[in-house]
Amino acid sequence: MAVTRFLTRAGIAERMSDFTRHLRAHGVRAGMPETESSLGALQLVDAGDPNDVRLALKAICASDVESFARFDELFAAYWLNAGKQRHDHTSTQSRSDQKNSLTNLSQKFSAPPADGSGSIDTPDNDNDGEAESSGEGKLIATQVTNRNATDMREFILPEDEARAAETARRIATAIRYRRSRRRKAARQGDGLDMRRIMRKSVATGGEPLHLLRRRRPDRPVHLVSILDVSGSMQLYARVFLSFVKGLVGNDQRTDAFLFHTSLMCVSDALRDNDTLRAVNRLSMMAQGFGGGTKIGASLRTFNNQYASRMAGRKTVVIIMSDGYDTGEAHEVGDALARLKRRGCKIIWLNPLLGWKDYAPVAASMAAALPHVDCFAPCNTLASLAAIEGELERL
Amino acid sequence: MNWQNLQTKLAGKGYIASSELAMAIHIALELERPILLEGDAGVGKTQIAKTLADIHNTELIRLQCYEGLDASAAIYEWNYQRQLLSIRAMAERTGDSGNAIDDIETRIFSADYLMERPLLRAIQQKKPPVLLIDEIDRADEEFEAYLLEILSDFQVTIPEMGTITAKSKPIVVLTSNGTRDLSDALRRRCIYNFVPYPDRTTELAILRARCPAVEPALAAQIVSFVQSLRKEDLEKKPGIAETLDWAAALGGLGVNDITVDPVALKSSLVCLLKTEADQAAIPSEVAQRLAGRAG
């Protein structure tokens, strides 16, 4: 373990702030206060012992699970890299890769002409493997094309996308607020506000003349939307994306995911200010994949990786999928049951439900139904708008 | 006192801390900053506060967080019944209530009528206590905001009385199970440590320290079994608390070798597997396989 030979001479304070900058560059949230505390901490430990210093700085600078896990690597890269300065661009690389993965993907897929209408019924040739593993999903997608010609997949006009986003905004407001458990002073309410009553009654010789009240205010809920972009849903993907974008664009308490055979978080991409660019970027991704569907596995990934952070008692999870699945059906049920236990509400929007004579007989859909709080159609914008009232009751 | 000392002291009280944890506590104590412990349930986050109180021979003040926790349950509340009685009594005594209003007001909003809740009590102690704010992630975000003033300046502002500053700075330990993200503002004020499930040697040391009665061979079996059980796909992985419970249960059942009696093994697993699905996921055969590997 050789200590870094820095090229320039610098005082310890300067070096430490450079280290904080190094951490910041690698995504750890650290700033002036951390530099200051670090310098303080160095006096408390044996500054000559790299291990002591590492532990001390870790205690100060790491502030969440992720940075805690990566700290040792970052520390070694800065202080113990045997004279080679900044040689570990690997971690920077991986991080920026992660960040830009959306852009990279969109660049990858922007080679073919990027208009949604053209590629609707061309089967994608570049992912044979996926199509093979999911023959069922593909087949059903073709049926959709043949039978039903009047629903959302016809919308490719920007106005309709704008309308979808507008509908989303209305629905988001409908489910936005949930009654809180904590009381707050209010003009009308079911509880007495003893503190204020007492204060006022001093003036009236202890007679509580003014009865002031408290009530439970409404507090915002966290919206999580999970959108199926597999082959069978491909036709709806574009409009749904605008819909999801409408939900996410509202505020920070919203997250969005796409899934086909695996799950990815797209909240940040959707917050892109340029609506069209965001939608294009994402729909390109969606079309690029569009193979089989593994609803169960995707929901499990969500449970394992994100649910602990996002799904709580004040969460509404909106799943948009047709329920045609190439994975095991019971997996969907299990994953939803587990998600449900976190106390969140689950809404399942199914575009096929709007069809005449549709019954949710697909095995995964049937397995999912017992755990779903609201099961509604979403094949037309009107039907999306219609569920607003129903969602308000949840 | 350096951090190795602290580690030894903790071990002396039966808490085996990793060097990372010991260093974090050392720095938190020296810099008088709160320490935030994150990790799965049952890895000994709450225990660290109890052990710290034990080492410093001081009071442990615990605030259990829950959804809907508010200032009147966590910081202070006025004693309304007493205030009401007092106003009446004074009004009768003076005859004319009008003259004594100022007097009454200063009196009923004084310390006598204040009911201290854990946070206010913690900063009112002469000897610095250990303040444990347990499962902060259960409380809502608004409550985190209340905490900020207390955690950074150790003071509480009561509109009727003014600001109460700490007589002594308590040692603050916050724990979180990670059911939701905490605000950056709160994280920044704390020394952070993630408490993982312990590795084999650490867990063995903990078991030895906490249950000295368990035979060394059985202890090794228990630890191996639990370690491999954590690798299975479970909803709720058993923590150290569960390991200790199980060791005690096996002691109570008179089991000296977990591979011998499958029935006893299966029935004692209730200590480790806390949900129906998990119990179904580990049938007797799997348990025996794990036990066989452990033995």
Image (cartoon, coloured by chain):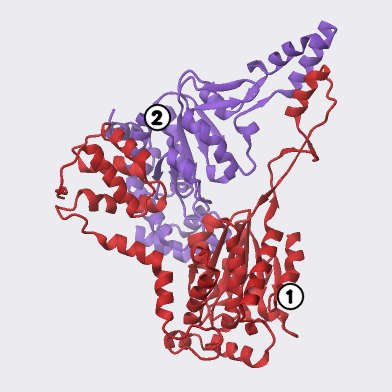
Relative to A376, say whether B162 is above or below. Answer: above
Residue B208 drawn at (x, y percent):
35, 41
Badge 1 sits on which subunit? Answer: A
Is residue A123 or residue B292 the one in the foreground? A123
Relative to A78, say whether B28 is above or below. Answer: above
Which quadrant of the rendered structure holds the C terminus of chain A?
Answer: bottom right
In this rendering, would A143 be left or right of A16?
right
Residue at left offset 63%, top offset 53%: A313
Whole-Å distance between the Cαs marked 2 and 1?
59 Å
Badge 2 sits on which subunit? Answer: B
Chain coloured red in the rendered structure: A
Relative to A281, say whether B86 is above or below. Answer: above
Relative to A237, say whether A373 is above or below. Answer: above
Residue A132 drawn at (x, y percent):
46, 88
Answer whether labels 2 and 1 touch (C-beta < 8 Å): no
For the residue labelled by badge 2, is the local secondary structure a helix, a strand or a loop?
loop
**Crowding at label 2, few (<14), some or many (≥20) Cα neighbours within 10 Å?**
some
Is residue B150 or residue B114 the one in the foreground? B150
Q: Is residue B208 visible?
A: no
Residue A23 is labelled as none
Amino acid beneath label 2:
Glu
Chain coloured purple in the rendered structure: B
Residue B32 is labelled as 2
Identify the residue under disc 1: A382
Amino acid beneath label 1:
Ala
